[in-house]
Amino acid sequence: MENNNKAKIKIVKDGPYIVSGNVPLSEKTITPKGKGYVFKEGRELPQSEVYSLCRCGKSKNKPFCDGSHEKADFIGTETASKDKYKDRAELIQGQNLDLLDDYRCARARFCHREDGDAWELTENSGNPKNKEEAIHAAKDCPSGRLVAVEKSGKAIEPEYEPSIEIIQDPEKRVSSGIFVKGYIPIESADGTLYETRNRLMLCRCGKSRNHPFCDAEHIRIKFKD
């Protein structure tokens, strides 16, 4: 089900993400649990009908923009494909479940479960427990890289209300990307729209090679807010 309210993210050329439509903003922390991971609540963040989120990684008021992109001469040229997910993704076939994978990875690691990763579990999805775990592994992927697909062709998605989460990753000693949930439209700096998706991760360290989406460069550069 797609979002039909006024929520929207507008990308400013070489500038911030402008979020409008009273989108709830929170912070979440990637936390190990067994061999997998869960999100735990982080600090409370101010709420507003319209707010600007830092995209360059230089703001002194993260996650909000403070104009530092201008002083830093930030170049935020968007390089990501606007092709639809299903046209970009590889179909991986399993015993009783399939998996779509477009390789846009934020290294959030939710694809790992107690009994294996999303790919292994899909391959061995003839076992009902493995199938259930594979579905969870795909649904919990915040970047939207993975989508579990029933053999009937039905994609399995979590039910999310429009919201934005600033992600922290203390296990890696870094700050992660911006988790966008619930089919919030994203407008490019050139005025065109990216495909509206239920879940995706936006870059906020300024170093992604696939702007505006997170590609886990925050780990390599040890980005911290």
Image (tube, rainbow, N blue to C red):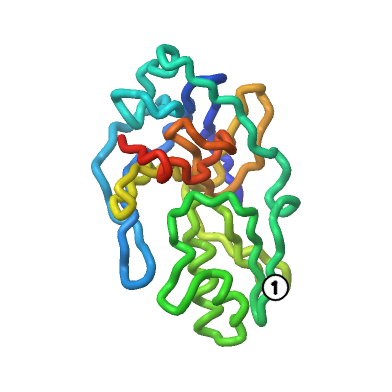
Check disc 1 and report the residue beneath it: 93
Disc 1, SS? strand
Q: Is residue 89 above or below residue 17?
A: below
Q: Amino acid at mark 1?
A: Gln
The tally of labels here is 1
Residue lying at the far bottom of the rendered structure: 127
Name, please, the residue furthest toward the front: 220
How many C-alpha atoms fall within 10 Å of the one at disc 1: few (<14), some, or many (≥20)?
some
**Residue lying farthest top?**
71
- Residue drawn at x 42%, y 16% is 72
Q: Position of residue 222 (x, y in %)?
A: 36, 41
* Residue 17, horizontal then vertical, whole percent: 48, 27
User: Where residue 67 sits in the image (x, y, percent)?
Assistant: 39, 16
Lateral position of residue 175 relative to residue 14, left or right: left
Query: Which quadrant, please, contains the C terminus?
Result: top left
Q: Nearer the viewer, residue 4 or 65?
A: 65
Q: Is residue 63 above or below residue 168?
A: above
Q: Image point 58% across, 59% down: which residue?
A: 146
Using residue 124 as the reference point, say whether residue 221 is left or right of it: left
Up-down relation of residue 6 to residue 218 (above or below): above
Quadrant hosting residue 115: bottom left
> Above or below — where is 171 with respect to 131?
above
Task: Determine the residue located farthest toward the right in the rendered image.
Answer: 87
At x 66%, y 41%, the residue is: 195
- Percent of width and height locating residue 196: 62, 42
Q: At 65% from the left edge and 80% from the top edge, which residue is drawn?
A: 96
